[in-house]
Image (tube, rainbow, N blue to C red):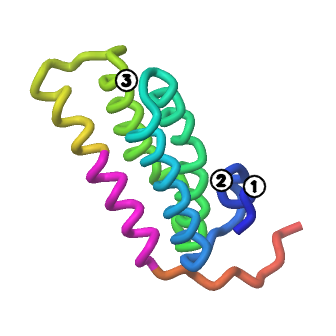
Amino acid sequence: MIFESSFVNPNGRTSRAEFVPALVTLLAVVMFYAFVVTGRTAQWCLVVLLFPAVILHARRLHDMGRTGWLLLAPAFLMIAAFAIWLGIVSLGAPLDSAVPLIALAVSAGFALWGCIGAGQAPSLTPPAA
């Protein structure tokens, strides 16, 4: 697993065999900041970790023959959940507790889809001139 290609560069593809270890690594880092580190530092580090998570999932979606734009739904939900968590936004008590759970469920669904979804063979046709 090459760090730059998996977590920084949105172009290209990530196979299932590369996706699962990269996802486990990312989840371990998230758990570290969520449960070991405290305060605003941990919260902002978790916000920063959204970027490599989106890149990793976009590359996996490319391998599955899908567009990375599908990640707008979980990304929007996660940003809303972080804004609620950080106290920047409040949508009322019922929604403040529901949005993070919905964001977690949608994100977990995308991660599971990436873990079990079949990739497509790369196209062998040369690009049009």
Residue 85 lies, in percent from the top left, at 32, 25
Residue 80 lies, in percent from the top left, at 35, 30
Assess whether residue 114 is covered by the magenta stretch: yes
Residue 52 lies, in percent from the top left, at 60, 48
Q: Measuring 23% from the left and 44% from the top, which residue is drawn there?
A: 102
Q: Determine the secondary structure under disc 1.
A: helix
Q: Which of these two is toward me, 81 or 71? A: 81
Q: Is residue 121 shown left or right of residue 127?
A: left
Residue 33 lies, in percent from the top left, at 47, 39
Mark 2: amino acid: Phe
Q: Is residue 51 shown left or right of residue 32?
A: right
Magenta stretch in the rendered image: 104-117
Q: Which label belongs to residue 7? A: 2
**Which class describes the residues within 10 Å of circle 3: few (<14), some (14-19), or many (20+)?**
some
Q: Determine the secondary structure under disc 3.
A: helix
Relative to 79, does residue 5 appear above or below in the rendering? below
Q: Are marks 2 and 3 in contact (CB under 8 Å)?
A: no
Mark 3: amino acid: Ala
Q: Measuring 42% from the left and 48% from the top, which residue is drawn there?
A: 31
Q: Measuring 70% from the left and 81% from the top, which residue is drawn there?
A: 123
The residue that mark 1 highlights is: 4
Q: Which label belongs to residue 83? A: 3
